[in-house]
Each structure stands twice: as C-alpha cells, then as structure tokens.
Image (spheres, rainbow, N blue to C red):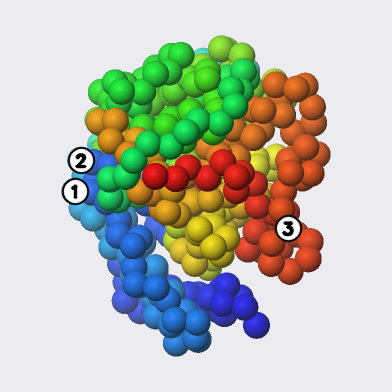
C-alpha cells in the first residue's frame, strides 16, 4: 500500500476533526499569494511510515485552514464566504448571460447592477450584482437562486497560486526556442522579465509579483519566446476571482494565444467553467496545477474542468510531492521541487510547488503546437511512465520535461 493511498485515508480523517469543522472555512487548494506572505512547504523530510504520513497529512490540513482563515480575517472588507463556504469577492454575485426580465426580478428584490462584462471572444455576458444592504453574500446567493431558479447564479470565487519560493540560486540555461505564444494567468512579472504583453484585470494591475515572475521565468528557461500575461491579482485582496480570470482568458484568446498556463487553484465556478469551455472550442489548450493541499483535498479547479491538462509535481528524485493536491483527472507530472527561477527582482530562487510544474508542461504543449501536431498524443509519447505501469493517481500518464528541469 503506497504512501499516497494511505494519505488519502489519513488526511480525510484529519480534515474531519471538530477543530477544522468549527472554523467554517472553505477547503480551497493552493498557496497564499505574495501579498499574504509565503506558506512554508519546506517541511522536514517525511518518514516512510504510516505515522510520518499521518503527521504530514495533519499539518497539510491545518496549514490550509490557517491560510484561508488568515486571508479572510485580513480582508473582511473585500472577501466573504459564499453559500458553499468558499472564498469570494464580498457583496457581489454574478449572473451568466441574463435576459432583461431576469435582471428586473433581481432588481425588484433589492439587488443592483454594478457592472456588465461582455466577453466577446468567448460569447459570454456576465452581470455583476450588488447584494442588498445588510445581507450576507451566502444568504443573498441563496435568495437569488430561489428567485431565479433557471438562471446561472454564482459568487465570484477566489483562486490562489499553488507554489512558494525559497533561497537564492544561480542562472539556468534556456532550452531550444519555441515559437508558439503562451499565455499566463497569474500576477504580473517584474521589470527584469521580457514578455510580449501584460494587461491587468484586477484593481491595481498590472503589478509585479514573485509568483507570476517565476512562472514567466520557467517558461523562458523551457524555451518559450513569446509570453503574454494576464494579471488577475494586481493589488486587489479579492484578486484571482473567477470573473478576472475569465476576462484574462477572453483577452488571451483575442490575441490568438494557443496555450494558457494557470498555476492557480480554487473551487468549481460556472462562469470560469464556461469561459474555459468556450476558449477550448476556439482552439486554446489549458494547463493547470492540482495544488498543494494533499491528495484528500477537494478537487482543484481549473485543473478539474473537462479538457484541461491537469499537472502534478515531482521532486529531484522523481517522487510525487507528498503535498500535491488532486483533480478529477490527472494528466502529467513535471519537476516541481529543487528547481530555480527568477523572482520579480530578477534574482534566482529555489522553488517548490505544483505551480512550477505547469509552465514546464505548457512549454512542451507549445512546442508540439509549433510543429502543428496533436498535443495530447505528442505529450503522451514524451511522457516517462513512473510508479505502477500505466496511468495512476500519482503521476497521471507520466513525467514530462525531466531533461528541462531548471537547475542552479
């Protein structure tokens, strides 16, 4: 019986403890973004025993709860829990493609239209509704769904980066040039990073971040020469929300970007799910992280949406990261520990987290598209089978980009 199977059982028990349940916090995956400080994933090496796995499982569960509690407590003026106890933008609900009679019913009930986004490339319209004064987001969501049973009503859920950085290292050598442009949904890169375009989709964006810079740096090291970045965070505590990501996707599709790298995780959201499905119909290939909250965490999105390439991480010995989360499907693994990339200031730092496996796989997908080939079939041919023979829950269909592992 493997450690990850045991971990499924034990972390599930850990998450069910009264202490965790009493916090009433959402079970989102991913690491806290830069402005909230860094989560310590450099924990002591785990013993190859059931006791060691159980201890790490408990620490993962506690870290997730603490992380989300801190985010909520620090930003109660901009972040709130929705009806499913997921983090979302405070005081706003989203309606997908509403007709005027639907809006009239909502407005008669005290909701106010505060914005309308027409995502022309994706064929979507999203209306932002302000909730009635004094009403919680969760209650408002329930009331609006009762009023509009046939409408798509959702909170604007948050998505958080899935990786952290560490000590300073040296420079790595870039791989062979890849011509296909790659889009990045994240924070903006620092000035030391050369990209084709950056556009902001959140308050205060574009604003440089270490996480976004590392993703761009890894793409460059893996050979990508055309990088386009949609900053969905800026300085907004409620950044990384579903609408901001959808706006970014719409912009990237309009720029004819074929591969989109998303190292963020959050809950399923109908607006974001629709945006990704529409972009895929336009030929976009999405690569996303499974997060770092352990294999018993809730399925990570957008990695779990149909057709998205879900990526996990391995360490320098090609062992699956024990903190790696899960998705409803798993496609590939890639290096995600003891690798190096440049932060916002241009200094090389040591990285760990499934975030950093994503750009390596995205680069391989872009290389395939540069040759006008079938992405999945080509990646399957490249993938090195690890673990038990064939696809498995730890490595998907195999390891990619081991030879392009960014070193010191």
Tell me if label 2 and label 1 are in contact, CB under 8 Å: no
Residue 114 is left or right of residue 120, and the answer is left
Q: Which residue is drawn at 60% across and 40% down?
A: 361
- Secondary structure beneath dot 3 equals loop
Q: In this orientation, which residue lies closer to the viewer: 240 or 100?
A: 240
Q: In this orientation, which residue lies closer to the viewer: 90 or 107?
A: 90
Badge 2: few (under 14), some or many (20 or more) residues near its Cα, within 10 Å? few
> Relative to 368, does residue 67 appear above or below in the rendering?
below
Residue 154 is left or right of residue 69, and the answer is right
- Secondary structure beneath dot 2 equals loop
Q: In this orientation, which residue lies closer to the viewer: 318 or 9?
A: 318
- Secondary structure beneath dot 1 equals helix
Counting from the top left corner in percent of width and height, residue 112 is at 35, 25
Q: Which residue is drawn at 50% across and 30% down?
A: 174
C-alpha span from label 1 to label 3? 44 Å
Residue 108 is left or right of residue 168, and the answer is right
What mark, if any, has residue 77 been given in the picture? 2
The residue tagged 3 is: 385
What mark, if any, has residue 74 been given in the picture? 1
State the image quarter where residue 295 is shown.
bottom right
State the image quarter where residue 205 is shown.
top left
Q: In this orientation, which residue lies closer to the viewer: 179 or 311?
A: 179
Counting from the top left corner in percent of width and height, residue 340 is at 40, 44
Q: Which residue is drawn at 52% across and 20% down?
A: 225
Q: In which quarter of the image is the C terminus?
A: top left
């Amino acid at each position: 019986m493997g450690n990850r199977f045991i971990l499924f059982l034990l972390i599930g028990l850990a998450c069910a403890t009264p202490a965790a349940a009493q916090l009433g916090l959402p079970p989102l995956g991913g690491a806290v973004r830069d402005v909230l400080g860094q989560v310590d994933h450099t924990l002591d090496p785990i013993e190859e025993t059931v006791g060691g796995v159980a201890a790490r499982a408990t620490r993962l569960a506690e870290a997730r709860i603490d992380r989300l509690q801190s985010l909520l407590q620090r930003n109660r003026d901009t972040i709130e829990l929705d009806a499913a106890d997921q983090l979302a933008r405070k005081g706003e609900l989203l309606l997908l493609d509403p007709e005027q009679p639907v809006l009239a019913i909502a407005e008669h009930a005290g909701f106010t239209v505060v914005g309308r986004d027409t995502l022309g490339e994706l064929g979507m319209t999203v209306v932002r509704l302000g909730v009635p004064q004094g009403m919680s987001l969760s209650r408002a969501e329930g009331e609006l769904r009762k009023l509009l049973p046939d409408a798509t009503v959702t909170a604007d859920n948050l998505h958080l980066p899935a990786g952290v950085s560490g000590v300073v290292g040296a420079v790595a050598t870039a791989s062979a040039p890849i011509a296909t442009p790659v889009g990045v949904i994240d924070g903006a890169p620092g000035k030391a990073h050369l990209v084709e375009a950056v556009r902001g989709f959140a308050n205060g964006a574009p604003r440089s971040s270490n996480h976004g810079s590392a993703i761009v740096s890894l793409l460059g090291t893996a050979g990508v020469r055309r990088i386009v970045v949609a900053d969905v965070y800026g300085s907004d505590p409620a950044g990384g929300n579903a609408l901001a990501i959808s706006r970014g996707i719409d912009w990237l599709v309009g720029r004819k970007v074929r591969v989109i790298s998303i190292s963020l995780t959050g809950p399923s959201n109908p607006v974001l799910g629709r945006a990704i499905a529409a972009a895929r119909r336009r030929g976009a290939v999405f690569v996303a992280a499974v997060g770092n909250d352990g294999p018993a965490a809730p399925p990570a999105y957008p990695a779990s949406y149909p057709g998205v390439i879900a990526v996990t991480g391995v360490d320098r010995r090609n062992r699956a990261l024990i903190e790696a989360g899960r998705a409803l499907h798993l496609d590939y693994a890639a290096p995600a520990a003891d690798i190096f990339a440049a932060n916002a200031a241009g200094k090389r730092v040591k990285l760990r987290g499934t975030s950093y496996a994503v750009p390596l796989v995205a680069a391989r997908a872009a290389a395939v598209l540069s040759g006008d080939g079938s992405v999945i079939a080509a990646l399957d041919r490249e993938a090195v089978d690890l673990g038990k023979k064939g696809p498995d829950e730890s490595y998907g269909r195999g390891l990619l980009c081991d030879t392009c592992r960014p070193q010191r």
